Image: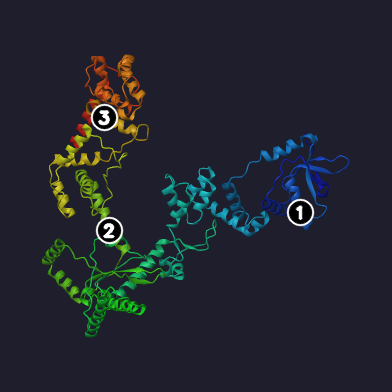
Amino acid sequence: MTKPSILVPATHLTKSPVNVRKRTDPRADAELEASIAGHGLIQNLVGVPVSRKKGHYRITAGGRRLDAIHRLIEKGTLPPDHEVPVLVLANSKDGREISLAENYDRLQMSPAEDCLAFRDLIEVEGRSTAEIAKRFGIEERFVIGRLRLANLAQPIFEALEADEITLDVAKAYATTADTGRQTAVWEALRNSYSRDNVNEIRRALNGYSYRANDPKALLVGRDTYIAAGGRVEDADLFSTAADERWIDTHILDELAEAKLIAQAEAIREREGLGEVRIVTGVRIPYMETYALQPLTGAAEPLTQEQEARKQEIEGEIAEIELLAEDEDYEPDDDEEQRYATLQAELTTIVERDAVIDPEQKATALAYVVLGEDGTPQMHHQLYVAPVPDEESSEADNDGDDCDDDVGDETQDNSAAGDARPVMSQRLREMLAMMKTELLAVHVASDPAFALDLGTFIMVDRESRLASFDIPSDLRASAPSRLLLDFKPATAAAGEWTKLDEALDRSWVNHQAVPDRYDAFCALPDEARAAWLGWAIARTLHAVPDGRAGTGFLDHLGRKLGVDVAAWWRPTALTYFDKLTKPGILALFEEIGGLELRVRYSGSKKHDLAASAERLFGGDVIIEPEIQERAVAWLPDQMRFAAPEICDQPTSSDNSGNDLTDTVNAEGDNDGDESFAQVA
């Protein structure tokens, strides 16, 4: 089909009209041109001889390469007599097929292969990014970007190689060179719905760094941060952002806190404050101050001059208002302006900012925050400093009685002054975490204690509608109702009301959380167990048939042996009114045959639904076998039936007992035994 390749001057070659590639890309052509100029023609052309022109050929495969060579000759990059290897086809009729085969069967390199190839050129062959960009006719920024992708954290790059993530997702992770930060975000998002969300990945990565214009960064300064070992990341290679990021967040946090503590101590001494806390941000978190009482001062009394002027203004205003009561009085613009000016002056005299005296400041709690420009500033609101609990004070006194020397030393320190160390928010949070870890270990080691504690947390939060004072995320919240306006009066709903009313709420009215908890723990075992059942049961979601979760709800119902027919019967309100007339008649036929259907077929829809309620409720005198089937009938959506056996007849053992009942009975026994062990 082909002859051996030969060298042919490029001037003797033209593109064949049978070449299947008709469109081109200027950028890709420029890259190809640069590649040929740097590496030569790596792949030969394919052509057929031109009749009547010996030594001339039409190129059927490689037209873009031939155009690039012609442009290089015109620019003088290649000599005019430059020769090109051409593979000659024996049969010119094969030209179109070969052209299609060459373009169609080409497999594009994956992004991961591109990245590794560029990295090898630099690390193995010692090429520079600028040199690579020039020889391949691409932008240096593109090469740097591929190198950043090649240096992705291992699990992310492996996902790119395996086509588990797209190139855009990989670029999102590569916006930072910190592989530790990449891995942390990857592990957090890989199994979530946001794993392929480029914007969410970028937001998560940004949370691990600070912009150069962040108040913390402005407070510390770039030189100080770098001198402490902090690293600065240049602008995002995959966007047009021009700002840099400081990626060693722990270094910046520590430097900012140290500097803010020093500034806060200076503010405390200058203002004569009792205690100062720092917040390395522009706002104080709500949870930081929600339990504190704001400190309010009092306005200074008016001076004699201010009091005299106040009375004078009030007299003038009273005269103007008295004149305005006359129906014939029409004030001019000057009088209206005079009235407005008097009102404004009176406001400045009467409404003045409250002043906090030095004695109040000496026991006040203040916060120092960062301004948008990184300048430390005292928050405008002062708070009443929290006092130690009486129990803690008594414990301290007891300790002093045991060691007089320690007590004397404490008194000496106290007498020396009220100077207290400024404690940063980070330090207080660290102490809180370590303290909670210690408590958690002990709770986890005492299951009985944990059971009472968990029950109390769940029921206390739901029994006191504005209770946000329990430091736990444990919830037993009732899910949203599928139909907010539908309240069926079923037997189960009535029984739930009885259960709720029977709960022992003697502990609820205590104001303090510790008092409520102790009162709850003092309840009898049965009362606490009832609260536990109430808390867990109310969390169950109503799941329409066929959706995720129905299988588990059915399993629970079978395990508890719920007899649905004894608790629930279909009524017009809860079922039949929602069916069409043919649908109701089909149910009549299902339990009583065609004769029963015909018997009720003349009824109107409303009357038919009422008749169905009576029939399926056992309130109609009818043949015994039909009545038995009617009172036992349930819609499939109300059954707790196993999916694999729901359409099969119930099996029986040799003694004639229903095996389903046996399973349910065993489920009841298991449940009772487990609950007894927990109680």
Which quarter of the picture shows residue 573?
Answer: top left
Q: Which mark is residue 79?
A: none
Which residue corresponds to mark 2? 432
Mark 3 vs mark 1, CA separation in Å: 81 Å
Can residue 128 be seen here?
A: no
State the SS at label 2.
helix
Which residue corresponds to mark 3? 559
Chosen colour scheme: rainbow
Can residue 451 be seen here?
A: yes
Q: Is residue 251 left or right of residue 595?
A: right
Please name whichever residue, 458 or 567, is drawn nearer the observer in this view of the structure.
567
* Mark 3: amino acid: Lys
Q: Is residue 294 left or right of residue 148?
A: left
- Note whether 187 is above or below 636 in the view shown: below
Query: Could you tell me residue 343's position as x and y percent?
Result: 29, 76
Image quadrant in which the N terminus is located: top right
Which residue corresponds to mark 1? 71
Image quadrant in which the C terminus is located: top left
* Mark 2: amino acid: Ala
Q: Is residue 101 left or right of residue 186?
A: right
